[in-house]
Image (cartoon, rainbow, N blue to C red):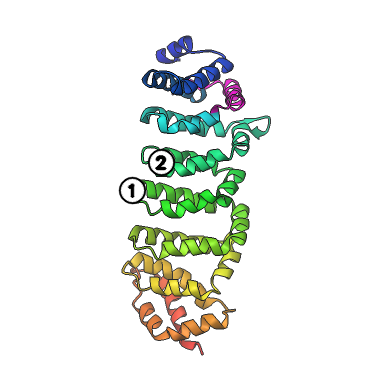
Amino acid sequence: MSFFFRMASRLRPSTPEEVVRSIKDSFLALHTRTHAKALEEVEKNISSLRLLISGDGEVEPNQEQVLQITLEICNEDVISLFVQNLPSLGWTVRKDLVHCWCILLRQKVDERYCCVQYIENHMELLDFLVGCYKNLDIALNCGHMLRECIKYPTLAKYILESGSFELFFEYVELPNFDIASDALNTFKDLLTKHETVVAEFLASHYDQFFELYSRLLSSTNYVTRRQAMKFLSEFLLEAPNSQIMKRYIVEVRFLNIMINLLKDSSKNIRICAFHVFKVFVANPNKPRCIIEALLDNRRELLKLLHNLPTSKGDDELEEEKDLIIQQIQKLA
C-alpha cells in the first residue's frame, strides 16, 4: 500500500457508513458553509472514495467494502447529490466523480445493480444529466455519465421515451465541436445498445423520430449532415432494424432526401446516401409512388450514379452502382 493511501486511510473515516456520511455532509455543506472550504472538503472526500473503490494502482480495492459503500451511497441518497451538485464542482473533482459513478453503477449487490435501481426510482436525474449538455463546463462529464447509464435497458428506454430525447437533435448541432460530437456519441448509444428497446421505441415514435432526423440530413452544417447520413446508412442496414428499413424505403419523402444527398458536394455523403438509396431501388415490392418518383427523376439519377465517386479497387461499390443503374433503366 502506498504512503499516501495509508495516510488517507488514517485521516479519513474507515467504515463504509462513515465514508458515505462524510461525503454526504460535505455535499450538503456546499449550500450552508463557506463555498471554498466546503468545496475543498468535497474534493478530499471524492478523492478518497475513488481510492477506496478503484485502488491506488498498487493495491486492489476490497470488493466487500466497495459493495457496502455502494449500498450506503444508495441508502443515503448520495447518487442524487452527485448529479445535482455537478455544476458546482471543479474540473478535478468532476473527473474523479465521473470515475466513481462508472464504478458504482457496475456494482451488483444480491443480483441487482443497486445504483441503477436507485436511478430507476429517480428518473429525473437522467433528465437533469441530458439538460446539462447546455452547460459548457460540465457537458462532457454528463455525457460520460449518461453513456454509462445507457448500458442498462431500463434507463435507455426512459431517455428515449422522455421529452429530453428530442434535445439531442439540437445538441448534435451545437457550435462547440467537442460537445456536439459527444452528444452524437450518446445519441448513437441510445439507438444501438438495446435492440428490443429501440425497436419498440421506433415502432411507436416512427413519424416523430424520422421527421426530426430528416432535419439533420438537411442541415446546413456539413459535419451534422455527414454524421447523420453516415449513422443512418449504418443503422438502417443492420439486421435488427430490418422492419424499420422496410417501412422507411416505401416513403417518397425519404427517397427525395436521398436523391438530394446524392447531389451533395461531399463525396462521403454521396456514397452514404447511395447505400440507402440503393435499397429503395432494389426493393422488389416498391409501391407505385416510389416507382413514379424514380421515373420522374430517372435522367438526373442516372447521371448522378454514373458520376458517383468510387475508390480505386472498390469493386463491390462499382458492381452495386452498375446494378442499380440497370434497375433504374428497366423501370417502366
Rounded to the nearest angstrom, the CA distance separating label 1 from label 2 is 11 Å
* Crowd around label 2: few <14 · some 14–19 · many ≥20 (10 Å): many
In the image, farthest residue toward the bottom: 332
Tell me which label, 1 or 2, sits earlier in the chain.
2
Which corner quadrant of the image does residue 224 belong to?
A: bottom left
With respect to residue 218, does 52 lie above or below?
above
In the image, farthest residue toward the front: 32
- 260 or 298: nearer the eye? 260
- 163 or 97: nearer the eye? 163
Q: Is residue 30 magenta?
A: no
Whether the residues at callouts 1 and 2 have beta carbons within 8 Å, the answer is: yes
Could you tell me which quadrant the N terminus lies in? top left
Q: Is residue 76 magenta?
A: yes
x%, y% of residue 106? Answer: 57, 34
Q: Helix, strand or loop at disc 2? A: helix
Circle 2: residue type: Ala
Q: Which residues are magenta?
A: 55-78
Residue identifier under label 2: 139
x%, y% of residue 258? Answer: 44, 72
Residue drawn at (47%, 48%), measured in percent from left and top?
Answer: 186
**Residue 35 visible in the snapshot:** yes
Residue drawn at (60%, 25%), measured in percent from left and top?
Answer: 67
Q: Helix, strand or loop at disc 1? A: loop
x%, y% of residue 218? Answer: 40, 66
In the image, farthest residue toward the left: 265
Horizontally, is 161 left or right of 89 in the view? right
Circle 1: residue type: Asn
x%, y% of residue 121? Answer: 63, 37
**Residue 95 visible in the snapshot:** no
State the mark number for residue 176: 1
With respect to residue 201, does 95 lie above or below?
above
With respect to residue 325, does 69 lie above or below?
above
